[in-house]
Image (tube, rainbow, N blue to C red):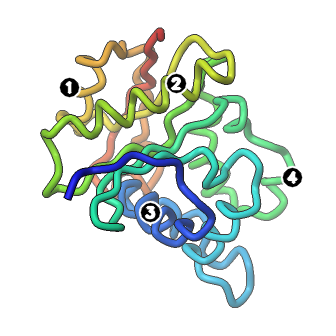
Amino acid sequence: MTLQYKSAERQDCRQIANWINSIGHGHIEYLLDGLVPHQFALEHLQKVLSEDPDYSFQNVDLAVQQNNIVGLIFSYDAHSNAFKPEMAKVLSQDRVQWMKYFSDNQISNSWYINTLGVDHAYRRQGIARQLLDLAANRALQNEFQSLSLHVYENNFAAIELYETYGFVKEKKIDLSGHSFFTTRDLAANYLMKCEI
C-alpha cells in the first residue's frame, strides 16, 4: 500500500489526541487531568480538537497507510499560543508556569508547529519532511512567511531534521525550574524559526 497525505477529519480527533500526548512526554495529561470533572485529559483534548477554532483537527495533516496514522503535523498561527489571563483562573500555578515557558517564548507572525511525529517504523523515509512541507503550505495560505517550533535540546534527531530543513535556533529556554521537565530529563528547549 502506498502512503497517503491528507488533512485530518473530525473522526481522527481521538488518534490525534493520543499522538499529541505521546509525542509531548505526557504534557497533555499533566496540564488537563482533573480540569473537567469526570473527564480524562485525552477526552478533554479530543473535545477541544473537535470544537476549538485554533487548536483544531482542521490544522492537522496526516500521513496514512492502510487507514492507520503513521505521522502527523499540527500547526497554526503562533499567536494562538498567547497565555490568556482566564487560564490562570482554572489552572494551578505550576501549570500556569509550565504554559508560560512556551507562551512567553514565541516568534511573532509565524506559523507554529505544535506537534510533528512519525511512527518509529516509518522514520527516515522522508515523511517528516513532507509533513513540514504541508505545514509550510498552510503557513503560506494563511499569509505567514515563517515557521516556528520548540524542540527539546536532547532531541538530536529532530534538531538535525529541522536544521536540514532550514530552521535556525533563535533562543535556548531553560526549563530546569519546573519539576515536569526535570523529572523527564528535559533541561532546556530551543525556539527555532524557518523562513519559507
- Earlier along the polypeptide chain: callout 4 or callout 1? 4
- Earlier along the polypeptide chain: callout 2 or callout 3? 3
Residue at mark 3: 21
Relative placement, left or right, of 100 versus 37 is left
The image shows residue 13, relative to residue 84, as above or below, that is: below
Q: Amino acid at mark 1?
A: Glu
Q: Mark 2, mark 1: which one is toward the viewer?
A: 2
Q: Mark 2, mark 3: which one is toward the viewer?
A: 2
Residue at mark 1: 160
Residue at mark 4: 86
- Earlier along the polypeptide chain: callout 3 or callout 4? 3
Secondary structure under the numbered disc 3 in the rendered image = helix
Secondary structure under the numbered disc 1 in the rendered image = helix
Residues at marks 3 and 1, CA–CA distance in whole angstroms: 22 Å
- The foreground one among 58 and 171 is 58
Q: Residue at x 29, y 18 (%)?
A: 165
Residue 130: where, in percent of width, then height?
Answer: 33, 33
Q: Mark 4, mark 1: which one is toward the viewer?
A: 1
- Earlier along the polypeptide chain: callout 3 or callout 1? 3
Query: Hey, which residue is sitting farthest front in the picture?
Result: 1
Residue at mark 2: 137
